[in-house]
Every structure is written in C-alpha cells, then in structure tokens.
C-alpha cells in the first residue's frame, strides 16, 4: 500500500467508520479507538468477513476516543495502546486484554537519508521533541551519525494532535530515558508539546512527515513499512542500535510476566536485551464486564478476537506486528470466562 492509498483511506479511518459490510447484520460488531492497530484490524476484518460473513465496523479515532466511546457504551469494544489502571477498570466496570504487540518508530523526511540510515539515541530524541535540538546538523545528532550528510535545516517536529495511545507509548519511553523530558513534557495520551505541528491519527502524522521536508514524526511501524518511509534506528537500553521489525518487537516482550500482571498492564518500553526495540507496546481491548441481555454482542466480539488470535497471526506478522503467543491467548480467554457476564450473571464465553 502506498502513502496516497493511506491518505485516501484516512478520510474514512480518521473521520469516521471503516465498515466491511453493505448491510447491517445481527452478528456485526462495532469498535473504536487506537490507530496503532488499524492496519491489523482492517486486514483481520476483511478476512473475517470472508470467512464468517460477519463484519467489524471499526473507527480509527485514537485511543482517547476509544476509551470515551466504550465508557459511553456507544461501541461494543474500545481499543487503546494505553492500558487503563486496574483501579479505573474496577470503578467503571470494565476489563481489558491485549490484542497484539507492535512498535512505535520515528520517521524522517531528509534528502539523501533513507530507511535505517539515521541513528538516534533516546536522550537525543527527547531533546528534539523538547525543542532543545532544533537543527539537523546539531552536534548531538552528528556525533551519532559519522559519515551521514546532515543538512543545516530546521527540524519540524510532528506529533499526534488527538488523545493517542501511540503518544502515551512514545512519551513514556522518552520520560524513561530523559529526566528533563519527564519533568517538562511528561508522559500521557495528550501532552503540551513545546514545538511542532499535529496530525490526527497515525495516518495524519505519516501524511505530514511525507510532505514536510526536514520533519520527524512517530508512528506505528506498519505505517512506515507499508509506505517505505525513512525510519531511524534507535539505541536501546543495552546500547545497541536496533532495526524496527517483528523480531525486535518480540524480543522486547521476552521478560513479560502476563500471568502475574493485573489487567495485563505490561510495559515493554526501554526493555533490556540487545535485540529489543525500545518503543514496543501491546494494544488493548476494553469491554464492559456486564454485557446486556444474553451478551450476544459481547460473544461476537470475543469470537472475532478468538479468530484473530488463531487465524489472523500470519496477516499480523506480514505487517510486522507480533501475534500473542498461545500461552498468553489462553490467559486472555480465561479472563473472558472469569469477567464477562450476561444480565443473568452467566459467563458469555
């Protein structure tokens, strides 16, 4: 898929609804939120429709929007790259589970600088987004890139304009590697950026970077890979410059103990390991524990994700996401049985 295809799709994905049916059916389900997972969800929805005849109507509006919509019960599930704290889940009668793992990457638009040619460290990246480094030929960047011809151009920072789980993951990482970023900009789905321009959704950030010379932005890796954007290498916690790809995202998850983590709130950013991509994250599905009536819609949501875990792994891998391993899938599906009930209190799975 080329960038112009994503830009054309963006009007649908960002402004409203991506639908995979021409007529509503009883088994159709609705979801909203993370644009981080949009490439995988769109591929899964297309294949699921072909396999079962049932449709997913998913709105790629950002994690903040997805959280609001599931809390308001206007969709069957929300999707967020920022896991909700257990206290918030309990207060709102919600449960969450991981759907997939992916990586956030930085992409640049610099003449003569292609994929993987530019190296950045976490502290330097934090200083770029904190407006402390404003020129591409700054000594801090040049020192990491001997032999790379860097222009004396201004750096145009591109960030997410909407409440974004991708922003949460990115700023959480920068806050870990830069004390000044942590106390200044901080981590969150929406932060007050000291410089730059905003884009709505991963789609909007990718589109802005593609058209603005001298720009840098952060997106889920599928957006960079599918559109052949120039991603940067980033030095990880072990001091190794790693390439973003499925294997380095998977390496970052190696030490995760999903079974002992309430709400599956596992943090992969700045993970140890020489092969670990430093800005790796799971994306989460949020549902109400108490499902209406006989829980028919909730059952259909679970059927979709059960299918995605077991039949959609290949499609996810082709987009360089990391499918959940079988033991984690079992933990997730056990959590469905324990938490999701119909109006009579009977488990819907």
Image (tube, rainbow, N blue to C red):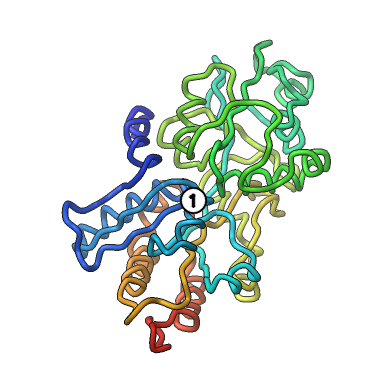
Q: Quadrant of the N terminus?
A: top left
- As drawn, is 47 to the left or to the right of 185? left
> Residue 195: percent from the left, percent from the top?
68, 26
- Which residue: 57% across, 39% down? 105
Q: Point out the residue furthest to the top here.
A: 152
Count of numbered circles on the image: 1
Spot occupied by residue 110 in the image (x, y as percentages of width and height): 56, 18
The local secondary structure at tag 1 comes to helix
Residue 248 vs 202, above or below: the answer is below
Q: Quadrant of residue 52?
A: bottom left
Residue pushed farthest front?
A: 72
**Residue 323 in view in this figure:** no
- Image-based side of 54 in relation to 16, left or right: left
Q: Mark 1 points at which residue?
A: 65
**Is the C terminus in the top left, top right, bottom left or bottom right quadrant?**
bottom left
The image shows residue 199, relative to residue 72, as above or below, that is: above
- Residue 340 visible to the viewer: yes
Q: In which quarter of the image is residue 253?
A: bottom right
Vertical order, 151 against 202 (above or below): above
In percent of width and height, residue 132 lies at: 78, 26
**Viewer-nearest residue: 125 or 70:** 70
Q: Residues within 10 Å of mark 1 (few under 14, many from 20)?
A: many
Lateral position of residue 242 relative to residue 12, left or right? right
Is the residue 23 above or below the residue 218 in the image? below
279 vs 349, nearest the viewer: 349
- Measured from the top left, where is residue 125 in percent x and y? 70, 33
The residue at 77%/23% (across/down) is 143
Q: Residue sitting at 65 percent across and 70 percent down?
A: 87
Which residue is drawn at the image coordinates 64% and 65% (left, top)?
A: 85
């Amino acid at each position: 898929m080329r960038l112009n295809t994503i830009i054309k799709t963006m009007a649908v994905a960002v402004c409203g609804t991506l639908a995979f049916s021409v007529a509503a059916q009883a088994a159709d389900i609705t979801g909203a939120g993370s644009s981080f997972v949009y490439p995988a969800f769109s591929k899964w929805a297309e294949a699921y429709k072909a396999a079962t005849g049932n449709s997913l109507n998913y709105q790629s509006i950002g994690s903040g929007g997805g959280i609001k919509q599931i809390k308001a019960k206007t969709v069957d599930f929300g999707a967020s790259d920022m896991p909700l704290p257990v206290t918030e889940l309990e207060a709102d009668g919600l449960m969450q589970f991981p759907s997939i793992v992916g990586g956030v990457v930085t992409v640049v638009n610099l003449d003569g600088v292609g994929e993987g040619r530019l190296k950045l460290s976490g502290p330097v990246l934090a200083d770029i987004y904190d407006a402390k480094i404003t020129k591409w030929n700054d000594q801090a960047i040049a020192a990491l890139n001997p032999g790379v011809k860097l222009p004396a151009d201004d750096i145009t920072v591109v960030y997410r304009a909407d409440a974004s789980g991708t922003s949460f993951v990115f700023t959480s990482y920068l806050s870990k590697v830069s004390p000044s970023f942590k106390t200044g900009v901080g981590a969150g789905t929406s932060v007050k950026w000291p410089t730059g321009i905003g884009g709505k959704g991963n789609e909007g950030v990718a589109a802005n970077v593609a058209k603005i010379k001298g720009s840098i932005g952060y997106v889920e890796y599928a957006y960079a890979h599918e559109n052949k954007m120039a991603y940067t290498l980033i030095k990880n916690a072990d001091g190794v410059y790693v390439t973003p790809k499925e294997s380095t995202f998977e390496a970052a998850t190696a030490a995760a103990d999903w079974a002992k983590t309430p709400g599956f709130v596992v943090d992969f950013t700045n993970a140890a390991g020489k092969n670990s991509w430093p800005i790796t994250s799971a994306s989460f599905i949020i549902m109400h524990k108490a499902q209406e009536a006989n829980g028919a819609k909730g059952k259909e949501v679970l059927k979709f994700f059960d299918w995605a875990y077991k039949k959609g792994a290949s499609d996810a891998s082709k987009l360089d996401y990391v499918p959940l391993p079988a033991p984690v899938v079992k933990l997730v599906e056990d959590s469905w049985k324990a938490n999701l009930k119909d109006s009579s209190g009977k488990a819907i799975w």
